[in-house]
Amino acid sequence: MSTATGVPKPVDDDPGVSQRTAFDVLSARRRRHVLHHLLRTERTVELRELSERLAAWENDVPPSAVTYDQRMRVYTSLRQLHLPKLHGEGLVDFDENRGTIELTDEAAELEVYLDVVPHEEIRWSKYYAGLGGLSALSVLSAGVGVVPLTWIPGLGLAAIITSLFLVSALYHCHYDANHRLGVGEEPPT
């Protein structure tokens, strides 16, 4: 493939978003909010609309209550820092002259990195490790004769443990579906 000047375009051996790029881009809350809004709207967005929406989220007010100063702080930051960064990484098309922003196909590759875990919650991996440890301790305790676990037949204990994992996994699926960038009105924290 060649460019408009006739110079061959280098072939990218590793197409897509690298882990370094994903973590760098997603490390900024404002960039996550940009991605959330663009994923949610699924259309080209004007910079004014985007800055007003982000200012509303950041100030915990409805968009109609955003002041000029609040919007301009976000607008300036988006225009000078965050949108050029997202554009440079190929995740959005930012047309500075028109003031429009649109997701690129490459942004879909961020999906694998978008497991948003609020600060006050436990990570699912730790939850399942704890549940597995508790299950193993229960089986071991029942095996050595700890009362009241000896009163539960082996199949009953297996059914309880299986039920705990099944209910946890179903809740985890539901939780993930509702706590992702681009889902819901408010961005995940």
Image: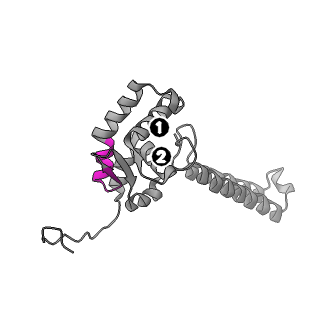
- Residue most extreme to the right: 151
Way the structure is coloured: one colour
When the figure is inspected, residue 147 is found, relative to residue 119, above or below; the finding is: below
Near-viewer residue (89 or 104): 104
- Is 53 in the magenta? no
Q: Residues within 10 Å of mark 2 (few under 14, many from 20)?
A: many
Q: Position of residue 28 (x, y in %)?
A: 38, 41
- Which residue was labeled with disc 2? 37
| Residue 145 percent across, percent down from the top left | 80, 55
- Spot occupied by residue 32 in the image (x, y as percentages of width and height): 43, 45
Q: Relative to 108, is 120 on the left or the right?
A: right
Relative image position of residue 55 (x, y in whole percent)? 44, 32
Q: Is residue 115 visible?
A: no
- SS label for mark 2: helix
Earlier sequence position, callout 2 versus callout 1:
2
Q: Which residues are magenta?
A: 82-94
Q: Is residue 128 left or right of residue 63?
A: right
Q: Residue at x 18, y 70 (%)?
A: 9
How far is disc 2 from disc 1 in space, using C-alphas?
8 Å
Kindly identify which numbered label has been placed on residue 70.
none
Residue 57 visible here: yes
State left or right for residue 139 relative to residue 129: right
* Residues under numbered marks 2 and 1 in contact, where contact means CB atoms less than 8 Å apart: yes
50 relative to 10, above or below: above
Q: Is residue 31 left or right of residue 178?
A: left
Amino acid beneath label 1: Arg
Kindly indicate the quadrant of the structure image that contains residue 31.
Answer: top left
Label 1 crowd bin: few (<14), some (14–19), many (20+), radius 10 Å:
many
Residue 150 to residue 29: above or below: below
Q: Which mark is residue 53?
A: 1
Q: Residue at x 42, y 44 (%)?
A: 34
